[in-house]
Image: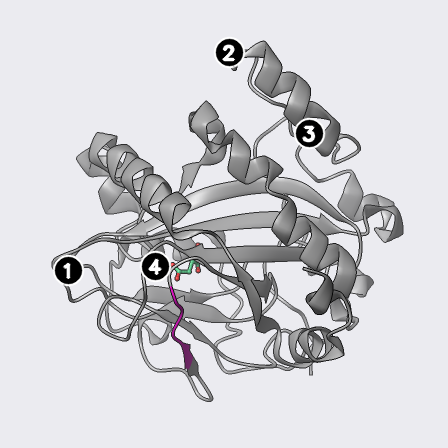
Amino acid sequence: MSSLAVDGAVRENFLTRGFTRTAAFLPPHRCRELAAMAAEHYARLDDDDRAARRSPGSLISFWEDPRFADVIAWTTPRELIGNVLGEPSFSNGYVVSKPARSPPTFWHQDWWGWNDAASYHPLPHQVGALVYLVDTSCENGCLRVVPGSHRRRHPLHRGLDEDQVRELRRCQDPTAPEHGIARGEQDVIARAGELILIDARVLHAAHANQTARARPAMLIWYAVDLHLWSDALRTRLPNVRVPSTWPEETRARLSPLLTGVGGVDQRAPLLYGLNPDERLT
Ligand SMILES: O=C(O)CCC(=O)C(=O)O
């Protein structure tokens, strides 16, 4: 990882484009193990869960299964973010499995604090480490990004409310612009295990999975430099805790990594602006 520490290009790329590929990888045997766990969890979802997230695929929290503990504790994304951006704190993580023959993931951004003035500054608050567990392609649902859209207004910044976002997740109206081609979009074709960093503010999507195999991925979110966050944002973060049902040894190992994260006793942050306002130009 030390070569990444001095690679200013990773930081520059991330800050200007809102995402960057890195030279870091999850080893192939871990990709296989985690892909099998992703399949196991997806198989347990009922039809309602699947329908509610038809467009993006599953959103299975790591807290569902103590076997995800090693991903929560994984040092590589922490070191990488620490070296190129600022001090990371784990905030939450998910398995995002796009099932076989599923529609595109709709265009969206994942930042929840647009009411705060600091959301319009270059440095991110929330950074995701995206790891695809199989090689991706345009056929099996690779990532798509609009570079720079974390700092510049785009026609897809439409000011959606939560109900509209729920409809997009269900792919209720496949003709909605969020399910289409975005101006300036780029494909990000990844190798299995490759670690991609993404600013929560950047517009992103994924192609349809037209193949007969699922396309599993993990999305691990970190808050960056929490000590610099405004009180308005920090107090809206979830107060992340290791489930009391997890083995004692695992709780002891993970708990120190979660200190100081939050605010509210719920799983997700309290919304403080779902959409950028006129300060995004
Ligand atoms: O499935 C992907 O490729 C991207 C995941 C994603 O956009 C999300 O869950 O926010």
Task: Note whether residue 269 is visible.
Answer: no
For the N terminus, which image quadrant? bottom right
Magenta stretch: includes residue 188 = yes
- On screen, residue 211 above or below 44: below
Mark 2 Cβ inside 8 Å of ligand 1 = no
Q: Residue at x 52, y 42 (%)?
A: 93
Q: CA distance from mark 1 to mark 4?
A: 17 Å
Identify residue for label 3: 239
Q: Between disc 3 and disc 1, whose residue precedes? A: 1
Q: Say which element carries label 3.
A: loop
- Quarter of the rendered image showing ligand 1: bottom left
Identify residue for label 2: 245
Q: Residues within 10 Å of mark 3 (few under 14, many from 20)?
A: some
Q: Say which element carries label 2.
A: loop
Disc 2, disc 4: CB below 8 Å?
no
Identify residue for label 4: 168
Marker disc for residue 101:
1
Q: Residue at x 29, y 57 (%)?
A: 55
Task: Note whether residue 147 is visible.
Answer: yes
| Amino acid at pointer 2 | Thr
Q: CA distance from mark 3 to mark 1?
A: 37 Å
Residue 106 position in % (x across, y down): 36, 65
- The mark closer to the camera, 2 or 3, is 2
Mark 4 Cβ inside 8 Å of ligand 1 = no
Disc 3, disc 1: CB below 8 Å?
no
Residue 145 position in % (x across, y down): 47, 75
Q: Say which element carries label 4.
A: helix
Q: Between disc 2 and disc 3, whose residue precedes? A: 3
Residue 198 position in % (x across, y down): 58, 64
| Amino acid at pointer 4 | Leu
- What segment carries the magenta color? 187-191
Q: Between disc 3 and disc 4, whose residue precedes? A: 4
